[in-house]
Image: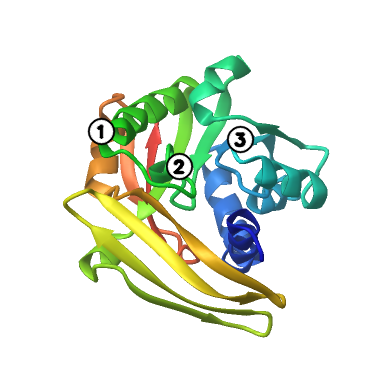
Amino acid sequence: MISLSREWAILSSQMYGQEFIDELADFLNEYGVRTILECGCGDGHVLHGLAQKGFCGIGIDSDSEMIKLALENNKHQNISYKEMSWLDIWKLNVQFDAVMCRGNSLSSVVSWGKEHIPSLTKQKLEQSICLFFNRLKDKGLLYVDTCSQGEIDRNGGKIEINTRDIHLIGQIEYDKQEMERRVFGSGSIFGEKFSGGSASYLLYPTELEELIKANNPSCIWHKKLVTERNYDIICAIK
């Protein structure tokens, strides 16, 4: 049975191919970004793609299997990977041109693969955004995303992925009273069976915007990338 971490790593590489990496790189170049801290880097697929285009930096993830996959499959001389929670990034003692937390990772700050506690999650979300800003250089770029308003308006719904190597059927469900987003499914990936899911905080784009504004950015906006079809992106300048 394939693990949740490996399942997400494979799906991420399918969803975020070279076109996404090219568009993201162009955007980062617009703001003079050279060094990147990616929080919740997963298996490092996107960061590795950016490194091949001249960027450098650090990818961190609290999931040991994700970091193992990154070191096995996505090593590059321009980047390093660390197994750590982004709640500990103050220990890095270095600042970056950009901090990214993408793939709806922020809402899973205390809940990857398990139930979350809403009150604790909100506290950790506030702490996370503050830590991200502290790791930015002056005029540095923050890039964070969350589940899209379109998905929220649809109240989640059915997921189906059918390619030559991936066959999955799943569901996104919301518990708006508990502020919880649940994603689960089953099927096969490269011939291996998968069944599972995760629960995370239901982070609305409007709430994410308010969390960022609380850190007094000089500029904040909703960024649209053609190749980002899953989440809503909010960016800010320190």
> Residue under circle 3?
36
Q: Are marks 3 and 2 in contact (CB under 8 Å)?
A: no
Relative to 198, say whether 19 is above or below: below
Quarter of the figure with residue 81? top right
Q: Amino acid at mark 3?
A: Ile
Instruction: Identify the amino acid type marked 1.
Output: Ser
The amino acid at mark 2 is Tyr
Residue 238 visible in image = no
Q: Which residue is mark 2?
A: 143
Q: Nearer the viewer, residue 229 or 167?
A: 167
Mark sitting earlier along the chain (1/2): 1
Q: Residue furthest front?
A: 1
The residue positioned 27% from the left and 39% from the top of the image is 118
Q: Residue at x 47, y 35 (%)?
A: 141
Camera sees residue 102: yes
Q: Do callouts 3 and 1 mark residues in contact (Cβ within 8 Å)?
A: no
x and y, in percent, of residue 144 in the image: 42, 43
Q: CA distance from mark 3 to mark 1?
A: 30 Å
Q: Is residue 17 positioned above or below 41 on the image?
A: below
Q: Where residue 225 appears, x then y in whole percent?
A: 45, 60
Query: In the figure, is residue 223 to the left or right of 61?
Result: left
Q: Earlier in the sequence, mark 3 or mark 1?
A: 3
Element type where label 2 sits in the image: strand
